[in-house]
Image (spheres, rainbow, N blue to C red):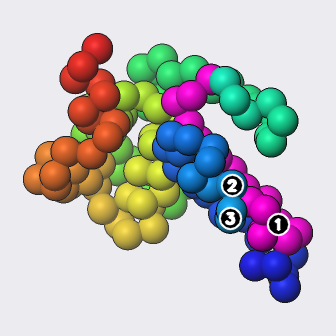
Amino acid sequence: MAAHEGWLIVLDNVGHLDRIRPLLDRAGRGRFLITTHRATGWHATATTLRLEVLAEGEALDLFTRILNPIRPGAIDGATELCAELGHLPLAVEQAASYCAETATSPRTCLRMLAESPAGPVRRRRRRK
């Protein structure tokens, strides 16, 4: 990475800055997008942007905008999938992009999510 520029790496759900500090220090001239549930401790390292959970309609709108230009009318199950993803903007965008790129229906994606081992997002949602 240090020999190249213009790259973007997404580090999702980073719990502690000290775990990624060596990577950040060696990175060179690219960019990181770091998601975290920790609201503090980033001011000296990164510009922070607080993102709220989307409302149900906003999540469905985001999902539809990504999927419909590629597969018009193929949103059956999108409302349920967005709800299962906790209406988290990045999760909704990734799921919609996955459905668009793989021609997977939202309903099938929802079934795949249900069949896979429970991930951090699903565990966190159930605790609330």
Q: Position of residue 15 (x, y in %)?
A: 51, 40
Q: Position of residue 12 (x, y in %)?
A: 52, 49
- Residue 67 in view: no
Amino acid bearing label 1: Gly
- For image coordinates 52% across by 30% down, the residue present is 37
The label shown at residue 23 is 3
Give the residue furthest to the left.
Answer: 115
Q: Quadrant of residue 45?
A: top right
Badge 2 is on which residue? 21
Quadrant showing the N terminus: bottom right
Q: Quadrant of residue 49?
A: top right
Give the residue furthest to the bottom.
Answer: 3
- For image coordinates 68% across by 62% down, the residue present is 22
Q: Front-most of 4 and 69?
A: 4
Q: Position of residue 89 (x, y in %)?
A: 53, 35
Q: Earlier in the sequence, mark 2 or mark 1?
A: 2
Badge 1 is on which residue? 30
Q: Is residue 104 above or below residue 106?
A: below
Give the magenta range: 24-39
Q: Earlier in the sequence, mark 1 or mark 3?
A: 3
Q: Front-most of 83 and 126?
A: 126
